[in-house]
Image (cartoon, rainbow, N blue to C red):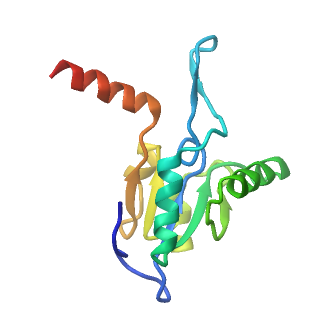
Amino acid sequence: MIDRPLAVKNGTAFATFDFDDTFTVPKWDGLLLTWRRTLDPNWSTINEACRLRCRGWDVSILTERKKSNCNVMEIYHFLKKHSVPIKRIDYTDGMDKHLFLKEIRSILHYDDDLYELMNLPEEVTGVQILHPEDRQQMDICEGMT
């Protein structure tokens, strides 16, 4: 949890969150042997966004999704249903997020994708949101010690 702004823009700290597998929790599909996207809420991430907003941060979503009517409505309804205090949503249309973070002046970015976090611009601090697969690996490793 971040207690105070790392830096500010125009007097307000600005944080971005990935949407899929960050605000939501993926589910394992045993038939297809893959993780599938869901709209099940990740309450710890939602609570973190609410805490930041209560501390005066601007909170936005930066997603690699394409800006289609379906995606816009799906994300909008999720945010409304779960009372997530988002100021705006930016869509990268499949492009890497680090290309957009500097432009939109985020100073803090939450994501489940380690590639995205490792490629953040220098002025952006990354916070990894663990994917269920990562949590399972941690549980296995802790059981071995």
In the rendered image, the quadrant that contains the C terminus is top left
**82 to 90, vertically: above or below:** above
Is 100 positioned to the left or the right of 111 in the image?
right
Total marks drawn? 0
Residue at the spot 61% in from the left edge and 51% down from the top edge: 95
The residue under the point 70% across, 50% down is 78
In the shown orientation, is residue 142 left or right of residue 25? left
**Residue 72 appears at what percent x and percent y?**
78, 54
Give the farthest residue toward the top. 31
Q: Where is residue 76 in the image (x, y as percent from the top left)?
A: 75, 56
Identify the image quadrant of residue 97.
bottom right
Which quadrant does the N terminus fall into? bottom left
**112 w.r.t. 14: above or below:** above
Depth order, front residue of 81/132? 81
Residue visible at 38% across and 25% down in the picture: 136
Q: Tell me if 10 is positioned left or right of 94 in this view.
A: left
